Amino acid sequence: MTVLKILHSTTAILFLLSSITLSILYFLIKSKGDTKIGVLVKAEWFLSAFMFFLGIMLMILHPFWFQVGLFHAKITFAMFGIGMAQYFYKQYEIAKADNNYPKFLYYFRILIPTFIFLTYYLGNNLLMA
């Protein structure tokens, strides 16, 4: 149980750091098909999927968390953040194949770290409650 919590928290921090790094590189590097960006996109995709899996496992083991209102806000932001990371990965692969990077990918690079940070912040407040 404790191992799952630590693993989930560590994954959330890594997800946030990789998302921030990816956003910075995405804004700074002119060539969006750069290898660094591609590796970080795949890392973000994997971390978001792994964090989702660990979150589901924790929810199964702690059903009483559903009684706390803050938990619902945390899950909402987490689902948006994870969903956007998954969507960004697929759209990036399509854009890379077509060599056409639409503007909305820039907006996603701003929103994803924001949602992840809010999720992490609300999760820490939930643990303190």
Image (cartoon, rainbow, N blue to C red):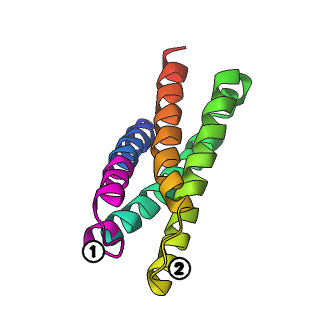
Judged left or right of residue 109, residue 31 is left
Residue at 44% across, 43% down: 8
Residue placed furthest toward the top: 129
Residue at 39% across, 68% down: 42
Q: Main secondary structure of the magenta part?
A: helix
Q: Earlier in the sequence, mark 1 or mark 2?
A: 1
Residue at 52% across, 57% down: 85
Q: Nearer the viewer, residue 117 or 74?
A: 117
Q: Amino acid at mark 2?
A: Ile
Q: Nearer the viewer, residue 93 or 121?
A: 93
Q: Label 2: which residue?
A: 94
Residue 44 image point, x, y percent: 41, 59
Residue placed furthest toward the bottom: 97
Could one spot residue 38 in this view of the protein? yes
Q: Nearer the viewer, residue 125 or 25?
A: 25
Residue 77 image point, x, y percent: 61, 39
Q: Which residues are magenta?
A: 18-37
